[in-house]
Amino acid sequence: MGTRSRAALIGLGVFFVGVAALARFYAYPTLAVAPADQIAHTVSAGPDATIFSVADLKEKKGVELEARRTVRGDVAAADKISKALNRKVVVFDTAVVTDDSKNYQFPDDASLTGLMPLSFVQERVVLDAHTGEAVRWNPSGDDNSGEYIATTLEKADRLKPDPKSALFKGHEGLVLKFPFGTEKKTYQFWDTTLRKAFPITYKETTKLDGLKVYVFEQDIPKQEVPLAKPLEVPGSLVDQLGQDSVEVQRTYKNTRTLWVEPVTGAIIKGREQQLATIAYDGEDKLTATKVTIAYDDATVKKNVKGAVENGHDEGGYQSKATQLHLIGFWVPLLSLILGLLLLGFVAVRSGLPGRPDGGAGD
């Protein structure tokens, strides 16, 4: 092998090894981040639910519940907080509206309380852009970029994190997604109702619409829900006929199942088996909510295949996972193998006995 051929092969070998390192240690970490401008909508259906009707003061069975979640990224807040913390974070404003009517819309007049949804919660969360874990951010003064949780549309009702509060100490664990490169293990996942994280454990690997997903399950045992003020109901509802009103407790338990695309950490499907009760003196008296509610088929399909909603691309995690896996695994692996083969070939050829003419002429 001549000097020029040897140099060319060495150059190519070093180039491919460099491509492998660049793809794995620069391109992949750059791409494996949650998009700060993400917009997402999910719809969950809960057929044959039981709820407690405040208007009728009685349980209603066979109710069709629908929960609509909107997630919207705040790019300006993400940039600001990332610089302040010297780490890459994303900021998402979320809203979940649950009602017994489809496509529920808030009334223009907020004073029409009878037209408000059965359940409503707003949250602002700050997440690590790589792992999806909650990041505490609670600035003081007039800075409104911090995390909060609220059950009304009024800004004055937003709960800010307070380590001493029984209502909201701050977000913790995973909230909206799993880490890039999700592992088959137990994580901590946020529960909005109880406002704290509980273990969620890998159960199995399966497929949704042809997409490989990890199934995680979270069992939240029955416990009282922290309330901002005492909950009172007419005594007759809890067998206290001689009292106009009595103070009761609200209990809650849930089994949450999540189907997660492991390369991106995106939640493709979610299902909750909720049971909330109204208890008096430690004994359940009424069913507040009993429902199995899960992403509808259209939401799952969108998350897998992708779709345009309100002018924005949403979902499409099958193709996103393929691209990210290519950059993070196949490109580095194949480039490294090719580079090492070229360098090895040069080393072997250089070690062979030279030709009678000294090997010149290439």
Image (cartoon, rainbow, N blue to C red):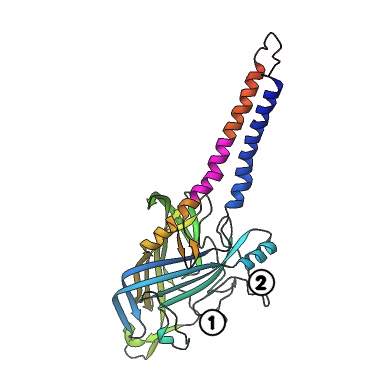
Q: Secondary structure under badge 1?
A: loop
Which residue occupies the extreme left position in the image?
Answer: 62
Mark 2 closeness class: few <14, some 14–19, many ≥20 residues within 10 Å: few
> In this view of the protein, which residue sits in the foreground, 235 or 190?
190
Quadrant of the drawing holding the N terminus: top right
The segment highlighted magenta reads 321-335
Q: Position of residue 13 (x, y in %)?
A: 64, 31
Circle on res. 154: 1
Any mark on residue 139, and which?
2
Give the camera-side residue of 278 and 108.
108
Label 2 sits on a secondary structure element that is loop
Q: Main secondary structure of the magenta part?
A: helix
The reply, left or right, for residue 61 in relation to residue 334 is left
Q: Nearer the viewer, mark 2 or mark 1?
A: 1
Query: Seen in the image, is 306 located left or right of residue 171?
Result: left
Identify the amino acid type marked 1.
Glu
Task: Please state the horizontal and vertical placement of residue 101, each as a whole percent of the image.
Answer: 36, 77
Measure the alpha-carbon separation of dots 2 and 1.
20 Å
The type of residue carrying mark 2 is: Pro
The answer to which image quadrant residue 271 occupies is: bottom left
- Residue reaching furthest top? 356
Q: Is 14 located above or below residue 245 in the figure?
A: above
Instruction: Identify the residue at image location x=65%, y=27%.
Output: 9
